Each structure stands twice: as structure tokens, then as C-alpha cells.
Amino acid sequence: MNLILLGPPGAGKGTQAARMIEKYKIPQISTGDIFRKNIKEGTELGKKAQEYMNKGELVPDDLVIEIATTRLLEDDCKNGFLLDGFPRTVYQAEKLDEFLAKHGKKIDKVLDIAVEKEELMTRLIGRRVCRSCGATYHIVNMPPKKEGVCDSCGGELYQRADDNKETVENRIDVYNSQTKPLVDYYEKAGNIAHIDGAIGLENVFAHIVSVLGA
Ligand code: AMP
């Protein structure tokens, strides 16, 4: 199964991806995670990406496409993959389709998760992430048992540098202007499913499973 999770920042793509990879036994490919790992390790790629990420802007297409397609060539993607946060522009989607066609593959399903702007703002500004295992929490809606500590692995929780009010607003605007046109792109391809992301994470997951099959 070759899948794409589409939706604005804060729609719950990462949360659903964590469940989907367990159920469907395919790897999650998050370009945002790849960039954050590079920033942490102080690589050249990380330095380049950070400039854009801190402002809530998109990293240039060619750089992202290179990173994503290199990752897709790895062995664990042979039987399927789940793209989370890629593609984010029509150009990226076109290049992805070209790349997949060259390798005799295609996207099977695009899951488009929709959530209202106000709710996205609340979710992102209160989001905390575990430094060790990547689990996500919310200071009000899903607080950890002990403040600042991950329930599952005991790791330290932190707030992403781009989860502040100004940057979040910009990321949502960028989504609407540059990424939303992908809905039309995949509508034309006939492989998109629309998911209401505001019905609770269990119900969202159930809807995804009903679309993909058990
Ligand atoms: P995410 O973790 O998916 O919210 O991504 C965090 C940030 O990484 C985004 O706000 C962008 O600056 C950058 N980024 C991640 N994926 C892409 C992409 N496909 N195209 C451009 N920039 C990206």
C-alpha cells in the first residue's frame, strides 16, 4: 500500500501515522522528521532547512524531493509506505508521480484530513513532543501523567520551535496557499478520500481503516 497523508499542520497526521504503520506494517516517511533529525545532528541539510522551518515556510522543492525520493529507495519501502508531510506542493506531487512511475509504482490512496483553523491553532500551540520516542501530547487535551515527561518511555517533552502562535499562523496560511491545491490534483487522479479530523482520534482512525480495508 503506497499512501499519502494530506492535511494542515495539526490535523493529526503524525498521530494517525503512528497507528497506521503498526496496523499496515509499512514505514512512515515524514520529511519534517528527517529535517528535525538533521537539525539536531547539525548537518548541512539541517542548517539549510532550519532557515525555512523556523519561519513556518516551505523548504525549497528540489531539496525536499531529493530527500524524499532517496528515502523511498530504501529497502523497507518495497512493500509500501506512508508519506506524512510530503508532497506539499503540486510540483512535489508531480515529481513524486514521475519518480514512482519510473519504478513501476503509484500512489494507491491519499487520505485528506480536514480540521478548522481555530482548532488547529489550539492543538499546535499546546502540543508537546517526546524527544526520545516522538509521542505527542497536549498540555490541556492530552497531558502526560507527569509534567514534561513522556508516559510511554520517560523521555523529555519539548515544544517544537515552530509550534508558536506566529509560526503556526504562517504554516496554516502556507498550507492553504501552497498545499491545498493538492486536493484538486489528487481529486483528478481519483484516489483521494476525505476524512473529518475533528471527530476524535479513535473515530478518525476507524474511518481511515474503513477506507483502506482491515
Ligand atoms: P512537519 O513536521 O510536517 O509539520 O514539517 C515541519 C516543517 O518542515 C514545515 O513547516 C516545512 O518548513 C518543512 N517541511 C516538511 N516537509 C516539507 C515538504 N514536503 N516541503 C517543504 N517543506 C517541508
Image: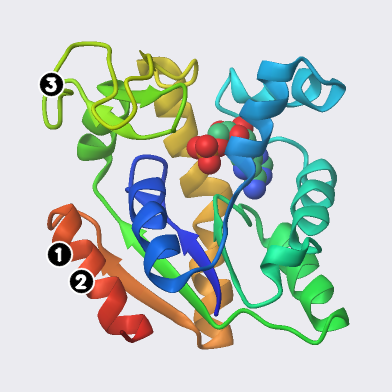
- Of the residues shown, which amino acid type is indicated by label 3? Lys
User: In x, y percent, where is residue 169?
Assistant: 40, 27
Residue 113 as seen in the image, left or right of residue 57: left
> Considering the numbered disc 1 on the image, is that residue within a helix, a strand or a loop?
helix
Quarter of the figure with the N terminus:
bottom right
Mark 3 or 2 closer to N-term? 3
Dot 1 corresponds to which residue?
203
Residue 174 visible in this rendered orientation of the protein: no
Q: CA distance from mark 1 to mark 3?
A: 24 Å
Q: Is residue 149 above or below residue 151?
A: above
Q: Look at the numbered disc 3 and give the secondary structure of its residue.
A: loop
In which image quadrant can residue 53 be found?
top right
Q: Secondary structure at mark 2?
A: helix
In this view, the residue in front, 205 or 174, is 205
Give the answer, above or below, for where 82 lies relative to 154.
below
Locate residue 124, reporting x and y percent. Answer: 32, 29
Residue at image x 41%, y 69%?
111
Residue 84 in the figure: left or right of residue 101: left
Q: What amino acid type should be assigned to the residue bearing mark 2? A: Ala
Task: Compute the Cα span from label 1 to label 2.
Answer: 5 Å
Do the residues under discs 1 and 2 have CB atoms within 8 angstroms? yes
Residue ID at (75%, 62%) = 72
Q: Which residue is mark 2?
A: 206
**Percent from the top left, x then y, of residue 91?**
74, 60
Q: Is residue 22 at least partly visible in the picture?
A: yes
Q: Quadrant of the C terminus?
A: bottom left
**Residue position for label 3:** 145
